[in-house]
Image: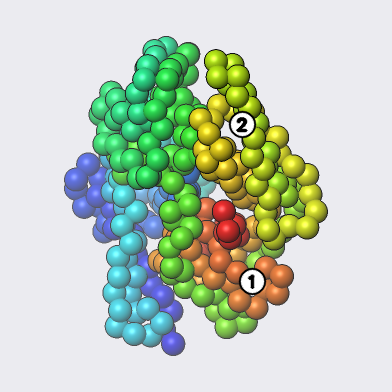
Amino acid sequence: MQARRVAIKCLYEGTDISTNVASFFKSFSVREVLSGEADSAEITLQDREELWQGDWFPERGAEMEVTLHIDDWEGESDNRDLPLGKFEVDEITNSGPPNEAKIKLISIPSESNLRGVEKTRAWEKVKLSQILKDVADGAGMESYFDAEDDPVMERAEQSEQTDLSFLQKLCKDAGLALKVTDKKIVVFDIAKYEQAEPVMTITKGLQNVLSFDCRTTIRNVYKACHVKYKHSKKDQLIEYTFTDPNKKTGQTLQVNEKVADVKEAEKLAKKKLHEKNLEETSVSLTMMGNFALLASNVVTLVGFHQYDGKYLIKQSTHDISGGYTTKVELRRIIDGY
């Protein structure tokens, strides 16, 4: 069986520099996350001729579009590309001896001011999708809202916050996730991705699992959620308790948030319990490199005993340094709510 040969295709400000990168290549790593953080990458190059600190020195903020290309997948004539999207040069490090250059990339455009400028402004009686569009338009980026529920904000106030931290808080409060990638700001419902079919089954002993680390915890894990809200105008008390059918013991999470009726209280109870119990069971795997192992994809684990089941990939790191490996951070998908 032939080894998997991975090459990096790079466009620098629209110009193909793949050959230049290949001539000096030492290593490459790209880290993509499900939500909450920007994707990032790092290219390490040998620089005996001092080109990468001289004539070829990349400019901060310059755009790089990166694609992984693989040949001879498991001995077959199977050539594939994995587009990683557009990044910006965030940091350059030159060191020696021996002379070496590191180029760090990030998926948030620097000129967008998403993470560097604090602002104060407010919205009233507006949907979350509209706030997302307003922020994206102001940053010169595209917006994409991928959720069935689009909550209406009575008042959303951004007070001396960056656009990114403000949006992240709004999304967290609404039970939604946020990701900035390829010059887009995306807000989505993680539950939708959890319901997708697994992209692969990983069987310990059969798949190319190089190492694994499994963990389960009872800290901040709850058996039930009790929602209680009293309408002052209606003088009406609304209560609802949802209990995880798979748990026999545990604490009850208390939530006091505005709900219109019992049906809304039930929905809120399930959402809050789901959020609290997300990290109960997690697995870290390092495997032979695989393009299918991307954040937001679902996999099934087999042969891991108590840890068998369906998992969502919340972070994926692809490393090329001599060989090609992929490390994934997984969390077990909660079944039933």
* Residue 295: percent from left, percent from top: 46, 55
- Residue bearing mark 2: 238
Vertical comparison of 104 with 333: above or below: above
Q: Most extreme residue toward the front, as rendered?
A: 235
In terms of image quadrants, where is residue 108?
top left
* Residue 103: percent from left, percent from top: 41, 43
Q: Is residue 320 visible?
A: no
- Residue bearing mark 1: 308
* Residue 241: percent from left, percent from top: 67, 43
Write the residue at 49% across / 35% down: 174
Q: Is residue 241 left or right of residue 10?
A: right
2 or 1: mark nearer the eye: 2
Vertical comparison of 114 with 265: above or below: above
Q: Is residue 5 left or right of residue 250?
A: left
Vertical comparison of 145 with 210: above or below: above
Write the residue at 33% across / 75% down: 71
In terms of image quadrants, where is residue 158?
top left
Write the residue at 43% across / 29% down: 167
Q: Most extreme residue toward the right, as rendered?
A: 249
- Rate crowding at label 2 as few (under 14), some (14 to 19) or many (20 or more) other CA atoms within 10 Å: some
Question: In the rendered view of the protein, which quadrant contains the N terminus?
Answer: bottom left
| Element assignment for label 2 | strand
Closest to the observer, 30 or 178: 178
Closest to the observer, 168 or 112: 168
Q: Is residue 311 visible?
A: yes
Write the residue at 58% across / 58% down: 336
Vertical comparison of 11 with 6: above or below: above
